[in-house]
Image (cartoon, rainbow, N blue to C red):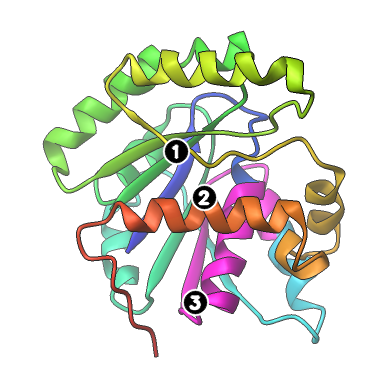
Amino acid sequence: MIILIGGEKGGSGKSCLAQNIAVYLASIKKASVLMVDCDPQRTTSDWIQARNSDESLPQINCIQLYGKIRNDLISLERNYDFLLIDCGGQDNLALRASMSVADHVLIPLRPKRRDIKTVPHMEDVLSTCKMVNPKMNASFVMTQCPSLPNQAGRILEAKEVCKSYGINVLDAITYSRNIYDDSEEDGKSVLELDPQGKAGNEIIAIAEEMLAMQPDNNYEFS
């Protein structure tokens, strides 16, 4: 299965989400995972380097690919249970090439106006790539949400705007929590820094809701 985490808006936590889902798949689901870093900022590659220097953590493989990577992804998919692609916050060749083969495209958005403004363009990109890749599922996911009760309406409103474009929006969300930054600095996941914590439960909920959308969701890994 190929999972793409990308979008047009930077700063929405794409790399953080990709890293945490990778650990969920590798550590909890015991799947073989390859992370593909398509972001020139190398956030995920740096995280992997920090992670793999800590012998106490299960290692995760990572490669960097840019540009026209469709054939590379098709070839790599044969060797892993999951390819997890981290694309930067822009519409580029790597994003569209990844969409052309992805089973699921997960697009993180903060419930902020400048993030929501990217939804119409992402709908256009998804529609174009769907013609090449009809098996592709796509979902928006709200990230870095404010936790104050009086801000709940903002989250719901952002979800409704996304749904109005005919694209699925996950029920699961992430809240703005320091642990996401703290774990990333150490090459870890929130699932490892605080296994029973609220952030870990957020990641599990997102991953399991996304996997449940796939036609064949009875995954068995070696």
Q: Earlier in the sequence, mark 3 or mark 2?
A: 3
Q: Earlier in the sequence, mark 1 or mark 2?
A: 1
Which residue has dot 2 on it?
Answer: 206
Which residue has dot 1 on it?
Answer: 170
Which residue has dot 3 on it?
Answer: 29
Residue 21 lies within the magenta run? yes
Instruction: Identify the residue at horizontal 27%, vertical 22% (top origin).
Output: 166
Q: How would you rate the neighbour count of disc 2 (Cα within 10 Å): few for under 14, some for 14-19, many for 20 or more?
A: some
Residue 165 lies within the magenta run? no
Instruction: Out of 154 and 88, give the one closest to the viewer.
Output: 154
What amino acid type is highlighted by mark number 3?
Lys
Whether label 1 touches label 2, CB < 8 Å? yes
Q: How would you rate the neighbour count of disc 1 (Cα within 10 Å): few for under 14, some for 14-19, many for 20 or more?
A: some
Q: Which residues are magenta?
A: 16-45
Q: Earlier in the sequence, mark 1 or mark 3?
A: 3
Q: Residue furthest front?
A: 149
Whether label 3 touches label 2, CB < 8 Å? no
Q: Residue furthest bottom?
A: 222
